[in-house]
Amino acid sequence: AHGNGVLDVTSRANVQIRGVSEVDFPTLLSALIELDLVEADAEREAQRRLTVTPFWDTGDLSTRLGLALEKIILPDLPDKMGVILDTGPSRLLQDTPGDFRFETSASGALILRADGAARGREIDAAQAGSALGEVAASYVERGGAASKRMAQHLKRVSLPKAWQTTPPAQSASKPEPGDAIGGQLLGVPFGQCDAGALRALLTDSSAAISPAVWHHRCVGRCMFRAVPKGARAGRLLM
């Protein structure tokens, strides 16, 4: 065991281990690398900018895009810039901070939209990596780093018309904790989860988890996964 026993679920759908000692850090890092949860190369790790809809399924568009985009080397971007994959059954990540948004249109076509623009560019899934690289390179070449975020950048520059052809589908309401597509949404009060409770949940249900980014007025952030009904989901609530 490492850290203080509490895991933080962040607003970018990451899980952070707090309270790791300097002595334990190398062992923990090696374990995370072995599990393919972090990159062995620090520069490659810095390229991990994806936030994926928690309502993904094996082999679906979100999964295919995520696996493909993990291999893309982007230009040097500000630290907080991120890529959103909001390509699940409904568009749900509209309020999640991000700068390059993969979404679907009302007709179901895949689009890439720069955050702050009302419309995006319709692309094929096979073009996702090259399209992302193109818009990221344009952002850098036109001095975007001075603005830090794409939405701020677009207040002083305009995108080519070819990048503003197709609006995204209408966004859906944020899910509430409880039964959801393929499983359950579990509330994580104030974004903190007891590591032991999470381990017990995984052991009891034989399920994996996928962090979500939504805030709920009562419980803070949520953590989603396909937890079979009857599993002791309540044990995740602190």
Image: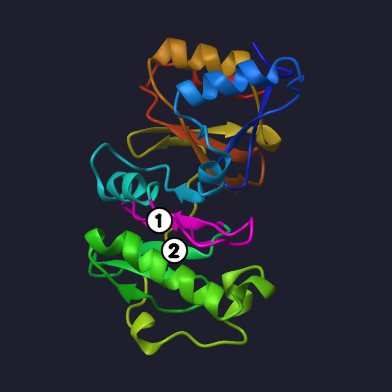
> Does 108 sit above or below residue 164?
above
Q: Is residue 61 left or right of residue 143?
A: left
Was residue 86 drawn as part of the magenta stretch in this picture? yes
Residue 47, image x and y in percent? 51, 49
Any part of residue 104 in sight:
no
In primary-sequence order, the first of circles 1 and 2 is 1
Please tell me which residue is depicted at 47% across the width and 71% down the height of the picture.
137
Q: Is residue 102 left or right of residue 127?
A: right
Q: Name the amino acid, label 2.
A: Arg
Within-10-Å neighbours for mark 2: few <14, some 14–19, many 20+: many
Q: Which residue is mark 1?
A: 86
Residue 71, image x and y in percent? 37, 47
Q: Name the amino acid, label 1.
A: Asp
Was residue 162 drawn as part of the magenta stretch in this picture? no
Instruction: Give the label on residue 101, or none.
Output: 2
> Does 125 sit above or below residue 71?
below
Q: Helix, strand, or loop for circle 2?
A: strand
Q: Is residue 62 left or right of residue 96?
A: left
Q: Is residue 24 left or right of residue 179?
A: right
> Do residues under tags 1 and 2 come within 8 Å of each other at their CB atoms?
yes
Please tell me which residue is depicted at 44% across the width and 28% down the height of the picture.
36
In the image shown, does 117 or 74 lie closer to the viewer?
74
In the image shown, does 232 or 9 lie closer to the viewer?
9
Q: Helix, strand, or loop for circle 1?
A: loop
Please tell me which residue is depicted at 56% across the width and 20% down the height of the picture.
30
Quadrant that contains the N terminus: top right
- Colouring chosen for the image of the structure: rainbow
**Residue stretch rendered in magenta on the structure:** 72-96
Any part of residue 56 in sight:
yes
In the image shown, does 169 or 44 lie closer to the viewer?
44
